[in-house]
Amino acid sequence: MLDIAKKAGVSKATVSMVLNKRDQSISEETKKKILKLAEELNYIPNSLARGLSTKKTGTIGIILPDITNPFFSSIARAIEDAANSLEYNVILCNTDNEIDKEVDYIKLLISKIVDGVIFIAGGESSSSVKILKSNNIPFVLVDRYIDNYKDEHGVYLLNEEGVIKGIDYLYKKGNEKIVFVKGHENITVSNERLKGYKYAMNKYGIYDENLIFKGNFNIEGGIKATEAILSKLDKVEAIFYSNDMMALGGMKVLLRKGFRIPEDIRIMGFDNIDICGIFEPELTTIGQPIYKMGKEACKLLINIINEVDIKDKEIYFETELIIRGTA
Amino acid sequence: MLDIAKKAGVSKATVSMVLNKRDQSISEETKKKILKLAEELNYIPNSLARGLSTKKTGTIGIILPDITNPFFSSIARAIEDAANSLEYNVILCNTDNEIDKEVDYIKLLISKIVDGVIFIAGGESSSSVKILKSNNIPFVLVDRYIDNYKDEHGVYLLNEEGVIKGIDYLYKKGNEKIVFVKGHENITVSNERLKGYKYAMNKYGIYDENLIFKGNFNIEGGIKATEAILSKLDKVEAIFYSNDMMALGGMKVLLRKGFRIPEDIRIMGFDNIDICGIFEPELTTIGQPIYKMGKEACKLLINIINEVDIKDKEIYFETELIIRGTA
């Protein structure tokens, strides 16, 4: 403002009045001159001062495990797109599923007066939710619900049904010995997916707990689980990995050992992350509408912030069986 | 503060004095009671008010093309890690390489009073830089420099040398007909990589401009370029894709058409993104220290913000030839 005042030959107070539209007492000529200079000098108003009086900053936080995981980068992208179209900014926080980091981020976001938080829980995150609630910060849970806080706003997937679709498909293809690689039990979605597996396998009378293996939801997790499967089981017809990253790690091991996919062994993943379609053979998977879920989560949060009437506190999305080359 | 005051049976002013450490006149007993309640009630101080007086918000912006691209998600992760360890927050902005979006984001970031910006240019981004400069916002360019602003703070890769290393390696393996897939000429790094190719091919007297093809820096770009190569050239010994995403798209086409890699055709990429190592065969590539570059960019920016003396305005990183299965 001082730069503009100097060039226009007026006081800083005059410039401030014009730029803040309290300019009734100022001549048209001076107004024009000031507005023209403001544009030339790339003047941008300070929204921080406004935020202090309205208590709204136009900024929301996203808390997620790791942005380098393609699933979360797609969700983050969707949230940022939706936020930007509604003139909100997004602060990114990576927790690595560590609860301490999560709590620290939540405190930091609150101190920065974010208008709301989109929260992909790292595990048993009830302490984080407690802090958000006691500070009256609107929040939306995405993908993973939190025990004791099931009534909060959230955007979720029908995980159980998704796995059932996959087992139905493999069973109809003639597979009965279907191995399942479950994820970490701290993550709610991995328990739901396991429940779907048990339900569907029991339905066909082919459930056998020795077919259940465990891995982390990443490439390494898939590699290790697959090595364990090959060393423990004699013959494997099909492996259902409960997320795509694990399936990609598993395929790597199988291809190296000379298995032909899908001729020798059928593979199914879960998520439908972008890179599923790059590999040869392309991964058959249970797709979730990742981008749409991120977008809806952001819209839901901004509706809460703006106190718009909300019909459903929880939004559930359906999965889709995506048949490609591995099964 | 009001909640604490009510529970402690004191005035809000007393609570404010204690929490803001202007508490000389207040009894130890009252202080203790207030601090204990503050913890119980998850009180978090408002740093916005402080930001208004210090003109520092502890927030920086990252402007990048697309967070779902594994290269940029790795850089963003590194920046966020470094920022967090120095108690800064990061606002994420995806520009899709569109200059208008870039300019809008920069204005928005400035209005939110970010302390600085890390800027991965989408193309001919001099208008964005002009706005940052005229608003005295510290910034650091990453990966892509901007014509007319070569003297600004930046973190870059020695791209030319990287490609030369790759050609040297392929030439020593006996390849002379080395196809090069260049990127879009609006992106400075693609021109540098092309320069490296021309230099190295001329050095061996095997340069032929008919071996140069063009693609966008993504899977689709690699697929299209590879289809063009196969339809225009009779025999291809090796293809050097100037980024990994293109190489992965290219491999997909080649494997589908029945080529064996590396027996029939050698493939080289550039970047060393995380997913290079997932595919079979694993991609041989020119690695850049992506995480390190992001981290250094963030540290450099925060040093500028804090007016620490800076030795080098520009930091250059070296590439590394990473030999895996495709060449």
Image: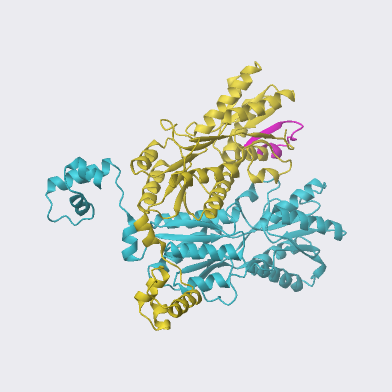
Chain colours: A yellow, B cyan
State whether residue B299 is above or below residue A116. below
Total number of numbered labels?
0
> Magenta stretch?
A253-270
* Front one among A213 and A197: A197
Place of residue B65 in the rendered image (x, y in percent of width and height, measured from the top left): 59, 59
The answer to which quarter of the image holds residue A230 is top right
Picture residue at 62% right of the left edge, 62% below the top: B97
The answer to which quarter of the image holds residue A125 is top left
Picture residue at 51% right of the left edge, 53% below the top: B77
Place of residue B44 in the rendered image (x, y in percent of width and height, measured from the top left): 31, 49
Picture residue at 73% right of the left edge, 43% below the top: A280
A102 to the left or right of B62: left
Place of residue B17 in the rendered image (x, y in percent of width and height, measured from the top left): 19, 54
In the picture, the quarter occupied by the C terminus of chain B is bottom right
> In the image, is residue A266 part of the stretch drawn in magenta?
yes
Residue B41 visible within the image: yes
* Front one among A152 and B217: A152
* Front one among A136 and B42: A136
Residue B327 visible within the image: no
* Front one among B46 and A176: B46
B107 to the left or right of B269: left
Place of residue A206 in the rendered image (x, y in percent of width and height, measured from the top left): 65, 18
A171 to the left or right of A213: right
B285 to the left or right of A145: right
State whether residue A295 is above or below residue A48. above
> In the image, is residue B67 part of the stretch drawn in magenta?
no
